[in-house]
Image (tube, helix red, strand yellow):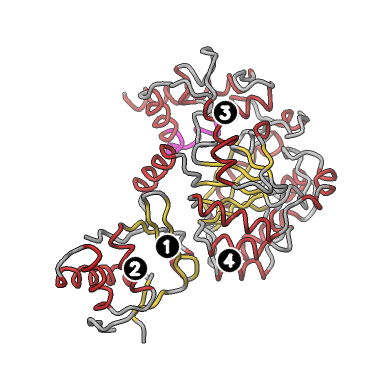
């Protein structure tokens, strides 16, 4: 499905975000990826974007929050969010919502 | 800015474990849900099963286990092994298991496979464990059932394996190598490969936790144990790598040079915690106490212990080939640092065999 700045996503199955010391991990609990026993380390920016997208924010809303949180230009934040969302979709952690 | 999104690599996992050891974060736990079992294996370290069944009323209930799991996750636990006894004997296994997964714990289940009914396969299909490890003690029903003491257990274990695989669950098979099944190890390995399951064996047999020594009579000769350990090029390479890597590092003076009490711990069915399954001598009662207090107190104390002897496999050139540990020693000899002759000989043979093969490969 095509995505644009108004695209919203939803989790595939269930994915738990874990913080262990300085590490942040996405742990799939339900669904096909969980069956493969994978865990996905992410950095602080990745964690922030994941949290926004997983709770149903649009790419634009998430990018605005990233720009504010990490003091980056809106265009850069938008590009990062789009790129990261694509990676999450490729790993079957998120899918574009309806 | 966001980096890659990919499954944790081996390098990342090693670095994560090293960080956990450095910061004393309890990332790995084994949880015995029960010490009861429906089999009566002749080598089992839990000893008299009638005694274990009498303790059933002392096992923590599901709510208490779930509360403990939540505390462990808060403290940083990621890897959880659910074991027994036979963990699937507990009717509340599904709710405990599901809670663990919902906390984001990566769960491995150890089972004998005989109680894997359709409801368990369905649970694991929906909410998958990282893997289920099933113990098989023989390539034939005769051998397996003679070791487990329960006729039909081999057939039931295989039915469980097939049920799990049909549900898409990752299954690994393993065996404890002992005199009655030594001749069947290779066939067991072939059977595992035939169904696409990983396989491993372990020749380590130790006394029962209550001190009974009957299982020791089942040990294969050190020569046989080493032959099996080094049977394939992959295993030889693994041992050589371990020996060389260990030799390159200073021996250090810690008695417990492992993860026990540093980044790993063990929980028994009754609310007790210890640095590892074998270190029952360091068990402490955790019921009613905050996990972090126990972890930072009694459990961590084992890591403060220093080696006193310099004439053991741990201390010398052979230490990379040493496959046992102080808790193992204590069970067998009563002294953390005192190896049995059996273990000493096994270590020496393993070192010699691995290095001899190393020289051959150099030619």
Cα gap from disc 3 to disc 2, whole angstroms: 42 Å
Q: Are marks 4 and 3 in one subunit?
A: yes
Q: Quadrant of residue B238?
A: top left
Give the residue at mark 1: A17
- The chain ID associated with circle 4 is B
Same chain for mark 4 and mark 2? The answer is no
Q: Earlier in the sequence, mark 1 or mark 2?
A: 1
Give the structural element (helix, strand or loop) at label 2: helix
Q: Nearer the viewer, mark 4 or mark 1?
A: 1
- Residue A85's quadrant in the figure? bottom left
The segment highlighted magenta reads B226-236
Q: Main secondary structure of the magenta part?
A: helix
Q: Distance between the Cα atoms at labels 1 and 2?
A: 9 Å
**Label 4, label 3: how many angstroms apart (C-alpha)?**
34 Å
Q: Does A48 lie within the magenta span? A: no
Residues packed near mark 1 inside 10 Å, few (<14), some (14 to 19) or many (20 plus): many
Spot occupied by residue B167 in the image (x, y as percentages of width and height): 57, 69
Q: Chain of mark 2?
A: A
Residue in the image at 61% along x and 61% along y: B97
Horizontal arrangement in the rendering, residue B310 relative to residue B46 (left or right): left
Q: CA distance from mark 3 to mark 1?
A: 35 Å
Q: Nearer the viewer, residue A61 or B34?
A: A61
Residue B124 tag number: 4
List the residue tagged with mark 3. Answer: B325
Above or below — where is A89 with respect to B164? below
For disc 2, the marked residue is A50
């Amino acid at each position: 499905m095509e995505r644009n700045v108004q695209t919203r996503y939803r989790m595939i199955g269930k994915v738990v975000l874990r913080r262990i010391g300085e590490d942040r991990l996405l742990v799939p609990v339900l669904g096909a990826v969980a069956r493969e026993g994978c865990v996905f380390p992410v950095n602080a920016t990745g964690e922030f974007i994941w949290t926004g997208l997983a709770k149903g924010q649009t790419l634009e809303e998430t990018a605005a929050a990233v720009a504010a949180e990490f003091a980056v230009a809106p265009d850069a934040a938008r590009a990062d969010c789009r790129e990261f969302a694509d990676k999450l979709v490729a790993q079957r952690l998120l899918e574009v919502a309806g | 800015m966001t980096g890659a999104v990919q499954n944790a690599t081996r390098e990342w996992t090693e670095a994560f474990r090293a960080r956990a050891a450095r910061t004393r974060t309890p990332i790995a736990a084994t949880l015995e849900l029960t010490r009861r079992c429906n089999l009566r294996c002749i080598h089992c370290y839990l000893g008299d099963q009638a005694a274990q069944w009498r303790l059933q009323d002392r096992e923590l209930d599901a709510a208490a286990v779930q509360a403990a799991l939540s505390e462990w996750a808060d403290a940083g636990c990621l890897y959880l092994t659910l074991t027994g006894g036979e963990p699937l004997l507990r009717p509340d296994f599904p709710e405990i298991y599901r809670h663990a997964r919902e906390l984001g714990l990566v769960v491995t289940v150890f089972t004998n496979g005989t109680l894997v009914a359709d409801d368990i396969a369905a649970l694991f299909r929906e909410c998958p464990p990282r893997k289920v490890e099933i113990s098989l003690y023989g390539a034939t029903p005769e051998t397996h059932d003679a070791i487990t003491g329960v006729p039909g257990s081999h057939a039931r274990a295989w039915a469980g394996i097939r049920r799990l695989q049909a549900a898409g669950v990752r299954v690994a098979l393993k065996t404890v190598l002992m005199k009655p099944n030594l001749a069947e190890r290779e066939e067991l390995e072939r059977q595992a490969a035939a169904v696409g399951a990983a396989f491993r064996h372990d020749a380590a047999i130790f006394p029962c936790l209550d001190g009974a020594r009957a299982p020791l009579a089942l040990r294969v000769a050190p020569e046989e144990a080493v032959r099996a350990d080094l049977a394939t090029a992959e295993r030889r390479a693994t041992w050589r790598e371990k020996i060389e890597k260990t030799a390159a590092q200073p021996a250090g003076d810690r008695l417990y040079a492992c993860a026990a009490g540093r980044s790993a711990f063990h929980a028994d069915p009754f609310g007790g915690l210890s640095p590892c399954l074998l270190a029952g001598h360091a068990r402490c009662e955790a019921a009613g106490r905050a996990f972090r207090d126990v972890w930072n107190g009694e459990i961590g104390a084992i890591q403060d212990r220093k080696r006193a002897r310099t004439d053991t496999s741990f201390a010398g050139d052979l230490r990379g080939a040493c496959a046992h540990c102080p808790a193992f020693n204590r069970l067998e000899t009563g002294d953390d640092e005192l190896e049995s002759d059996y273990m000493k000989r096994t270590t020496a043979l393993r070192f010699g065999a691995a290095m001899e093969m190393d020289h051959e490969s150099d030619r």
